[in-house]
Amino acid sequence: MRRLGFARFVLAFGVAAAPGCARDVAPPPARPAAPARPAVAPPRQAPPEGSYWDPVEPELKKTFGAARELPLDLERLASFEGATRALDRAPAGARAGVTMQGFAVGKPVGAKRPGAFYVELRERNVPYVVTFDALLQVAHVGVDRALAELERRVLEADLPVLLERIATRLDIESVGVGPDLLPGFRTARGLIAVARVLLGGAPPADLAPLVQAELALVRARSGPRPSPILGVTVDYSLLPAEPRGGLRDAVAWLGVAPLVVLGRSEAEGAPHDVGAARVHARAAMLLARAVDPAVDAQSHAMYTRLARLGRFVAGPAEDVGLADLAEIARKSQADLRDPTAAGNVAKVDRVRAALQSRQPAQLYDGAGEVRVRPGASPRASAVGHATLSVRALPLAAAPDARVLQTLVFPVVGPLERPAPPPTARDGLRALPSSLDVGAWLGSPDARAILHDTGDDAYQGYGAALSRLLQLRAPSESPERHASFYASMLDALGVYLAPSAADRLQSYAQAPIFPRRKLETALAGWTLLRHDQHGSSRPRAAELPRIVRNLSRTPPPPAFVEPHPEAIGRLLAALRQLERGLVALGGLPAGSAGAEVLQAAIAIVAAGYEIAIASANDDAFTPAQLITLAELPSKIAELEALVGPEVAAPEVTVDVHTDLASARGLVEATGPIEEAWMAMRDPGSPKVVVAVGVALPHFELTHPSSLRMSDARYRARLDAGGADPSARPARMGYTRAYRFDDAD
């Protein structure tokens, strides 16, 4: 299962689910319903300190009008020339889709960005609706640039200095040490030397052959191989898809390289004996000493800054980091301020004994050895690291990653139907599905689709999913917002739930509309995972001068998809990110990343204001009409600020690997598509057919040795223009509302 990388805002790696054992559990009912919400919401608790979360909650009226009943008579809707022309040129069936269900999704609009598409609609006098899809893409652009700025100002500035200070200290302190401590120094120095060479440095002369052998594997991305420096297995294919060297490869290496501190006699499945475990433990203690505040205050400040920013962006790490190890050593009477501590076998073993009681990382990322734990503990994955390891820059595990790993073999048992679904391998659920995440986020339709397609027809699937739902933090709990990543997951879950505005909109009454929302949420989830995966992110750059894109006067009717509850959560999450990054020193005021994020926040805030008016059935004020008229230009200006590569909606991210078959599960978004929606004009009985952006979601599999990147994926999409068979296939449930003549 792919985890979020260190400092959780930079990279995302990790795989899961090697074959093992499972328990037989009765399958779920044919059409399981979503868990009922509590009648009374629990009291709101304060968010965790350092989360910087401040909720945005819409004030909604308790009385509403009513939506026009389906099917719609398009001839009796508010007549508008641009809308008529748009429907006339729509694919066959789209008009019937709007008639029967109040909305339809059509063909891709080419290489256009959402802002450019909305400007074109406005200039052609076509009524438009800024969809939640469009707001998710705006948020993605803002988040991506903010994190790129963070990388440039913190990682690029601090990491080379930090590694140089650590390397210098290790080189000096290793001179003249005894034979017991020398292997630990060699391991620690080699681990750091690989990262420094990736950053453009040179290896120490005495370690050059060993470092070059390690670098050959790092650059080849050849899958699981014994590490020349560490002596344990490392899955080198987990490094960024396209070797670039530099910062991202260095960070990837420091996150993936494990120092396994327990031996076979101490932890079942550990990869080496106690002697080798002591070598790794000494190496870890030497590295931790190098960032101890009493030993090197500057190194400690840089290291803890990275760790704190990582926790804020994506949550805590599962593995033990260097600062954590220093504290554990201190409590074990092995104070690392004493330079002889790592050479004292009694102190080393006390530290290892303290670590033995800690839970190994639950998401297996290919490093070290895998262990299939007996049974399926509801609070722990059945597949994970065989034993605990220390990482120089430990990885974070997202809760949705644990969902994907838990819903495969061995927690889930053998297939119980003749025709295997795509997730099956040899009768086992080897790959999960994005629909698992949709069901975990609260979508009854995702759960129903899994059942209808037979993708839940595995022993124990229903029981495992039920446990995951029970363990998910309640909607009002502070854990929902303990990190920016958690807040974004919460926003997607809120969008999947009904809105108070639904009773005003005809399309919301269509039984198929929740499936359209499901695709939007999964596309948003893909963007979120991609934002945490820095290997495809262009470097932060200075902003160009932008000429304002003036709006047409008078503009056509315009709307925002009215789900104020979800847009409010999205807005609050973006403000949380800005507030936290500024407070923690990762996003200076006036920087390019801060400017882009603020522009994205302003667009989402404007959409939130319009959505509240729509939900309350309040006629738009003159100021709100101006806001609606300017939204296309605002989105287009944001896209011009960041450039075509960042603004492109077509992205891809690996989320899971089946170790046995070496297949990777890939989530992707595609070129934007037209969405037609029959929109209620607030404060009046009029209904207008408006056109907006639909963000498609794809799910692919490919060899894990060929990690997908944005560049490779976009090249595949370009090839699909001439060869339809090269285009990724849509998930089957989308056919109910999509009408594309090319399909």
Image (spheres, rainbow, N blue to C red):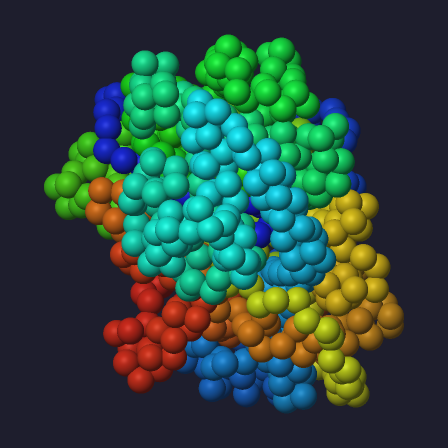
Residue 531: which quarter of the image? bottom right
The residue shown at (79%, 64%) is: 591
Q: Quadrant of the C terminus?
A: bottom left
The residue shown at (52%, 28%) is: 177
Residue 380 in percent (x, y) is at 43, 24
Q: Nearer the viewer, residue 726 or 195?
A: 195
The residue shown at (84%, 59%) is: 589
Residue 692 in percent (x, y) is at 58, 72
Q: Nearer the viewer, residue 165 or 498?
A: 165
Residue 706 in percent (x, y) is at 32, 60
Q: Nearer the viewer, residue 439 or 611?
A: 439
Q: Is residue 239 left or right of residue 251?
A: left
Q: With respect to residue 269, does 650 lie above or below?
A: below
Q: With respect to residue 642, does 395 lie above or below?
A: above
Q: With respect to residue 643, does 328 lie above or below?
A: above
Look at the image and tell me whether residue 269 can be seen: yes
Residue 168 in percent (x, y) is at 62, 44
Q: Is residue 118 left or right of residue 682?
A: left
Number of marks in the rendered image: 0
Q: Nearer the viewer, residue 377 or 126?
A: 377
The residue shown at (66%, 35%) is: 291
Residue 169: which quarter of the image? top right
Look at the image and tell me whether residue 606 can be seen: no
Given the current orientation, which residue lies at the most extreme left position? 418
Q: Is residue 215 left or right of residue 577?
A: left
